[in-house]
Amino acid sequence: MSGARGWLRLIPVAVLVTAVLAGVVTWVGAGSIEGDLAGRSRSALAAAGIRGGDVSFSGRQATLSGFPADQAGRALGIVQGVDGVESAEVSGGAAPNPPSVTPTAPSKTSPPPSSSAPPSTTSSAPPTDRAGVQNELDAQLADAPITFKPNSAQLTPEGTQSARAVAKLLKDAPDDLRYRITGHVAEGPGGRTSAIRLSQSRARAVMRLLTAGGVPANRLLVRGSSTAAPGEGGDRRVEITVEER
């Protein structure tokens, strides 16, 4: 009987040791992922010539700190584009938008317009609401979709040109709008997981081009889909949805 009681006393100890060992393994694994993401993020920032700050991780969520105000938005976009990063933010709030440029007052010596040539009334102001921006964006992507080479996240030359044209439209849109970039890949032999991974890489590639074109990174969201977009070639395209912040 005394031997049975001894074994019973050892059971809680064994359970406690097992729980501690499992916690240590989980902690070590998480630290390895965070270290890998931090190292690759710092390398990407250094390759882009951005220094003076640091990036840290909690799981797959990045926090940027110490970057100059004029580089914080670009640094945020670069870290968000690193594979494996789920989200990123600048410590103390979202990255500031690029400063607006004050228009120069017209010269007083400019000659008055000729009375025989009235000012043109055909030019239209850019849209200022969500529906207007979405309509113009849809029309632009219908004429020139953002496309990729088969089975890769590399844009075609036409896709690159289209993404840069989209950047010109979005950077001038109201600050209370944000844009969800959805990459599309039809599910193939690699299965749904492989398709979503490639579609996310395509969305990140477009996000990097939009950021380089002046669209603030904190107004861009990326999403992957294992289904093709409507229309011909929909498995090699991205869609952009305008949302209110």
Image: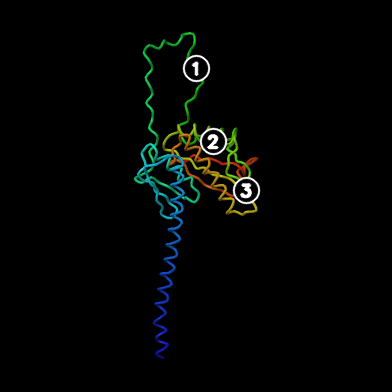
For disc 3, the marked residue is 186
Horizontal side of 231 relative to 164 (left or right) equals right
The Cα atoms of the two marked residues, 2 and 1, are separated by 30 Å
Q: Could you say whether the residue bearing mark 3 is in a helix, strand or loop?
A: loop
Position of residue 140 measured from the top left corner of the image (x, y, whole percent): 56, 33
Q: Specify whether 162 is left or right of 8.
A: right
Image quarter where the N terminus lies is bottom left
Q: Which type of secondary structure does the marked residue at label 2 adopt?
A: helix
Mark-to-mark CA distance, 3 and 1: 47 Å
Mark 3 and mark 1 lie on one chain; the one further toward the N terminus is: 1
Disc marking residue 120 = 1
Q: Is 228 situated above or below 165? A: below
Tell me the kind of residue under disc 2.
Answer: Ala
Nearest to the observer: residue 1 or residue 229: 1
Q: Percent from the top left, x then y, of residue 114?
A: 46, 9
Q: What amino acid is found at the position of numbered circle 3 in the picture?
A: Ala
Secondary element at image label 1 = loop
Q: In terms of sequence position, does the residue under pointer 2 or pointer 1 come before the other?
A: 1
Q: CA distance from mark 2 to mark 3?
A: 21 Å
Circle 2 or circle 3, nearest the eye: 2
Whether 138 is drawn above or below 87: the answer is above
The quadrant where residue 163 appears: top right
Task: Kindly identify the residue that appears in the image at 56 percent across and 41 percent down.
Answer: 238
**Rendered image coloring scheme:** rainbow
Callout 1: 10 Å neighbours few (<14), some, many (20+)? few
Residue sitting at 51 percent across and 20 percent down? 122
